[in-house]
Image (cartoon, coloured by chain):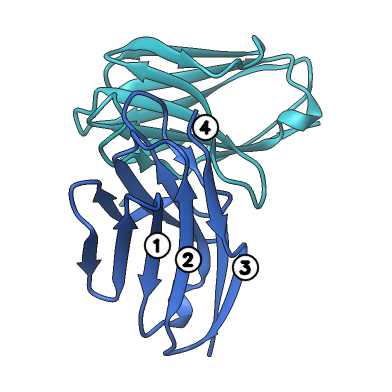
Chain colours: A blue, B cyan
Amino acid sequence: GENVEQHPSTLSVQEGDSAVIKCTYSDSASNYFPWYKQELGKRPQLIIDIRSNVGEKKDQRIAVTLNKTAKHFSLHITETQPEDSAVYFCAATSGNTPLVFGKGTRLSVIA
Amino acid sequence: DTEVTQTPKHLVMGMTNKKSLKCEQHMGHRAMYWYKQKAKKPPELMFVYSYEKLSINESVPSRFSPECPNSSLLNLHLHALQPEDSALYLCASSQDPGGRQPQHFGDGTRLSIL
């Protein structure tokens, strides 16, 4: 089955700096890769997703890149703000098996 | 606004009690999910309903019993739970039972077993 590794587990950045979270997956058939943000005590919320037919997707300060050959994908947050502080989960699926989540990255943005 | 509504928000129950968690969505989604989430961990899939039929049971103990009365509602019946079952229980829905569309999560029910 699919296995998703996520790094780092914790990340601290200064406000205004960029943050990068990386995930690798094992199943080459995986073709859908969402990213979820979960603030303390809140539900996971989809912030961006990417499909295997594109290599990069951007939405304002957030971007995701996908390297199918290396089987890894990354979340990039630019100009970080205190409200970006949360736990971020990557996930992957081929559609034939359930969504598999990474273990999460706790991002702290220091003002 | 949360498009997936879960009730109750908090639940405290004893190990001999029977209770139910409820989830409702009105987005016309055909897949609904139950997840269990422990602190500082990712959501852990429990059940998937596809077109109102149970399609995946991730080897969940029988003290958890799911039910999908119609395409908008999903219940999780609880009986004789153990202290280790204390967690946040999340419901989610998706357009695509195959999982390749975004899953929308509810706010969850925080369950404490005494």
Q: Position of residue B98 (x, y in %)?
A: 29, 25
Q: Which tag is nearer the camera, tag 3 or tag 2?
A: 2
Q: Are marks 3 and 4 on the same chain?
A: no
Q: Are marks 3 and 1 in contact (CB under 8 Å)?
A: no
Q: For residue A80, say whether it is visible.
A: yes
Identify the residue at horizontal 35%, vertical 80% (top origin): A78
Q: Position of residue A36 (x, y in %)?
A: 41, 53
Q: Which tag is nearer the camera, tag 3 or tag 4?
A: 3
Q: Are marks 3 and 2 in contact (CB under 8 Å)?
A: no
Q: Are marks 3 and 4 in contact (CB under 8 Å)?
A: no
C-alpha distance separating marks 3 and 2? 10 Å
Disc 2 residue crowd, few under 14, some 14–19, many 20+, Cα 10 Å: many
Which numbered disc, 3 or 2, marks the residue that appears first in the sequence?
3
The residue beneath circle 3 is A10
C-alpha distance separating marks 3 and 4? 23 Å
Disc 1 residue crowd, few under 14, some 14–19, many 20+, Cα 10 Å: many
Label 2 element class = strand
The residue beneath circle 1 is A74
The number of numbered badges drawn on the structure is: 4
Q: Is residue B76 above or below residue A80?
A: above
Q: For residue A43, say whether it is visible.
A: no
Identify the residue at horizontal 50%, vertical 40% (top origin): B108
The residue beneath circle 4 is B35
Quadrant in which residue A104 is drawn: bottom right
| Residue type, numbered disc 4 | Tyr
| Residue type, numbered disc 3 | Thr
Is residue A94 toward the left or the right of residue A22 in the image? left
Q: Are marks 1 and 2 in contact (CB under 8 Å)?
A: yes
The residue beneath circle 2 is A21
Q: Are marks 3 and 2 on the same chain?
A: yes
Chain that bears disc 1 = A
